[in-house]
Image (cartoon, rainbow, N blue to C red):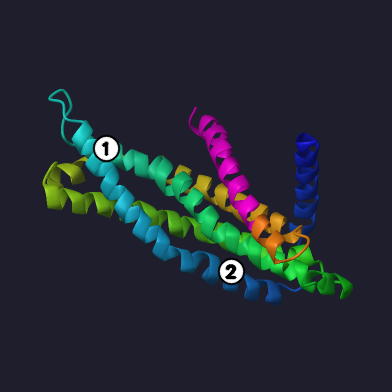
Amino acid sequence: MSIISSLESVGEYALLMKRVLTLPDRISQFLKEFLKGVYTLGVNSIWIVVIISFFIGAVIVLQIALNIDSPMLPRFTVGVVSREIILLEFSSTIMCLILSGKVGSNIASEIGTMRITEQVDALEIMGVNSANYLILPKISAFVAFMPVLVIFSMFMGLVGGYIICMVLGTPSVETYVYGIQAFFTESFVWYSILKSMLFGFIIASVAAFFGYTARGGALEVGEASTRSVVTNSILILATDLVFTQLAMG
């Protein structure tokens, strides 16, 4: 029964996205909601990205410095490995897992509340494509702002490592900076940004789906929000595995 239910949900999601991914009837209204989404979903997420990235970057460098303590490996390896971890996985995948909780639950609860208070039905009665009107600006805003969040995350992660090197002195700041610059591959940055934009679409669209299809009362809205976060986490990890194999395999 759960497999059938899952397949039904996939079909409902596809049909909803067919309604969402159409040209807006009123561009001016779309732009207004788009800018509102950029601020609500993107700008308001910068603080959590900055704080988490700083401390995780510091911990990554600390752990690598403590565990890579071999005379066979130069000390600048700490900077190289830390950079690759932050660029390739942390600033895209792990950060999107964290944002799926903040942004995903925000979208699911907002649209779910509109659904159970019959605001969505009112839009439909007025002849408005409610799916396009409510969901497309949120998806577009979050996907468009994801590169900014990723760049903030990369920068603060590396800064966190720099600070921990200043405090502990192992490795030295100069050695750490040299390691960050050594063997740098620019394509890794673009890979991370592209992957995060894909994850941003998954987070916003899946959360909107659970909110849009919520039925009942306030309790069901909470359940829809929880299901959206769990589903997004699974989809992000599965997509990360497939995307990494396709892009870098």
Q: Residue furthest front?
A: 219
The front one of 6 and 61 is 6
Residue at the (60%, 42%) spot, across then down: 235
The picture quadrant where one finds residue 225 is bottom right
Residue 242: percent from left, percent from top: 57, 33
Q: Marks 1 and 2: in contact by CB < 8 Å?
A: no
Q: Which residues are magenta?
A: 225-249
Amino acid on which disc 1 is placed = Val
Q: Is residue 119 visible?
A: yes
Amino acid on which disc 2 is placed = Gly
- Choose the circle earlier in sequence order: 2 or 1: 2
The front one of 194 and 69 is 69
Q: Is residue 118 left or right of residue 207?
A: right
Residue 167: percent from left, percent from top: 13, 52
Residue 138: percent from left, percent from top: 63, 64
Residue at the (41%, 40%) spot, across then down: 88
Quarter in which the N terminus is drawn: top right
Image position of 158 with respect to 2: above or below: below
Q: Which residue is mark 2?
A: 37
